[in-house]
Image (cartoon, helix red, strand yellow):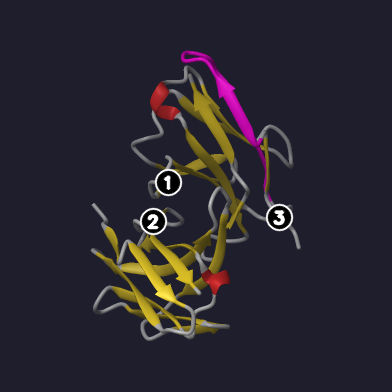
Amino acid sequence: EPEVTQTPSHQVTQMGQEVILRCVPISNHLYFYWYRQILGQKVEFLVSFYNNEISEKSEIFDDQFSVERPDGSNFTLKIRSTKLEDSAMYFCASSGTGGEKLFFGSGTQLSVL
Amino acid sequence: ELKVEQNPLFLSMQEGKNYTIYCNYSTTSDRLYWYRQDPGKSLESLFVLLSNGAVKQEGRLMASLDTKARLSTLHITAAVHDLSATYFCAVVVTGTASKLTFGTGTRLQVTL
């Protein structure tokens, strides 16, 4: 069964450093998303991406965050200058259309020290 | 602001028993999803409910949606240990394309 893959599975970084989280969505999907989950808390929406542009973003997704689809397969989330409170599990997801179920990747655990 | 609340937050139940998890949301929604999450793992899609009165069943789990009451339920029949996980409902607000707002989650522990 096709799946969303994310790399790396764990990322440790120093506060103020830039990180790039990578995702390969399911190949024929058109909608891409990033969500995050702080340990023990609920899952929070960050951003959705369709047709090479952001379609929606949350208040969490400030100027420190950006997304990109650099080629036909990858979808990345960049955090320019990480803060301690960015520590979380980041999930990438994709869907075929806006109304279908979202398939989530296995996540990247980001730890900011 | 959309609020999605689940109850209970934690549920310990014995194998063989039945129970229901409730998901209330505060505004009109087009779609409601149920996800399962095992500790340290990703989110596994269980159900997508698209209309008022929708009912879906898979194995020992059954989900329903009442859009007028803004309520979804996830009913567990004759629980088994393998169902131990955290269950999240997630709602898409009418008029927004794709943003899921997740509930607080219900941590289910099924004991022998």
Question: Is the residue B51 above or below the residue B84 in the image?
Answer: below
Cα separation, mark 3 vs mark 2, equals 21 Å
Question: Helix, strand or loop at disc 2?
Answer: strand
Question: Helix, strand or loop at disc 1?
Answer: strand
Q: Chain of mark 2?
A: B
What quarter of the picture does the N terminus of chain A occupy? bottom right
Measured as percent of width and height from the top left, residue B28 is found at 28, 67
For the record, the magenta segment spans A9-25
One can see residue A102 in this view: no
Q: Chain of mark 3?
A: A
Left or right: residue A35 compared with residue B5:
right
- The amino acid sitting under disc 2 is Phe
Q: Which residue is mark 1?
A: A45
Q: Residues within 10 Å of mark 2 (few under 14, many from 20)?
A: many
Cα separation, mark 1 vs mark 3, equals 20 Å
- The amino acid sitting under disc 1 is Phe
Q: Nearer the viewer, residue A53 or A17?
A: A17
